[in-house]
Amino acid sequence: METILSATGLLTPGVEYGRVAPLADDADPVKAVGAVVPVQTHSLNVGVLTEPGQSFPDTDALITRLRGVAIGVRTADCIPVLLYAPDIEAVAAVHAGWRGTVGDIVGVTVSRLEAMGADAGRIMAHVGIGICGDCFEVGSELAVCFEDAGLGAFVLPGPFTDRLTGEPMDPDRRHIDLRCANVSRLLRRGIPEANISVAPECTRCSEIAPGPCAASVAGSGMTLAVGSEGKSAARSGVRLPSWRRDHGTTRRMLTWIRLREECPS
Ligand SMILES: [Zn+2]
């Protein structure tokens, strides 16, 4: 499968990454990419893939130094975070929902990379497509949970207008910006701001123009959610899997990363 790099993303010659969003419930983006994906449970457990074929129960972040082997995470509103540590040639894929954000799974993953010899000041990070703050409406208990975790800055004051319907949202509910909360976690671990990119799209309210790879994987019911960074695409665009929008959906987007087979010269 061809690889697409986002315009604002983790652009570096040693790494390739992408996202795949299935159009049908039974399509499996993991198979389409051939990625190793953990059995995610909203834990703070980090696995290290040292040989292809390993499995990772109860794990929400993966690290590998294997070249040419894609690792990834499945999401439907949660935040996928990709990391690249060039000094030790390692990549990581992290699943950060609200529990993982409060528990700092990106920080735990950065610590693991540091234990493997990485300098946090050289790590590059991409905070991928997840739910936006406007769409992530929560109860006051969860807001307090974020405040207690030092993430009060990412509990947003309302009022909000529903970006899907244009209707006013419940003024008594709070909103949380999960993406920026994870950026703050990365900054606190010493990753330079210049090394962090954030995908602006939202799984719930954005439509994404089908990527140039859509045709090549059409038979598998897949389309690639790439391109058109920062734009709300035309109505013919693709809706990404969203738990909040499509209650109970089994569709998941795969966000993956791998070290290129060949060392860049
Ligand atoms: Zn949104």
Image: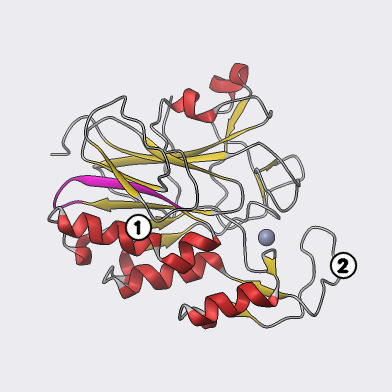
Q: Where in the figure is residue 185, as x and y percent of width and height? A: 39, 70
- Mark 2 lies on residue: 167
Whether residue 211 is visible: yes
Up the image or down, 173 lies above or below 107; here it is below
* Quadrant occupied by the N terminus: top left
> 10 Å neighbourhood of mark 2: few (<14), some, or many (≥20)?
few
* Quadrant occupied by the C terminus: top left
Q: Nearer the viewer, residue 231 or 143?
A: 143
Residue drawn where x is 71% and y is 40% of the image: 249
Label 2, ligand 1: CB separation under 8 Å: no
- Mark 1 lies on residue: 125
Q: Nearer the viewer, residue 138 or 184?
A: 138
Mark sitting on residue 109: none
The reply, left or right, for residue 87 in relation to residue 34 is: left
Up the image or down, 219 lies above or below 33; here it is above
Region in magenta: 86-95
Q: Is 93 colored magenta in this rendering?
A: yes
The quadrant of the rendered image in which ligand 1 is seen is bottom right
- Cα distance between the residues tagged 2 and 1: 35 Å
- Inspect the image, locate mark 2, and give the three-letter code of the amino acid beneath it: Glu
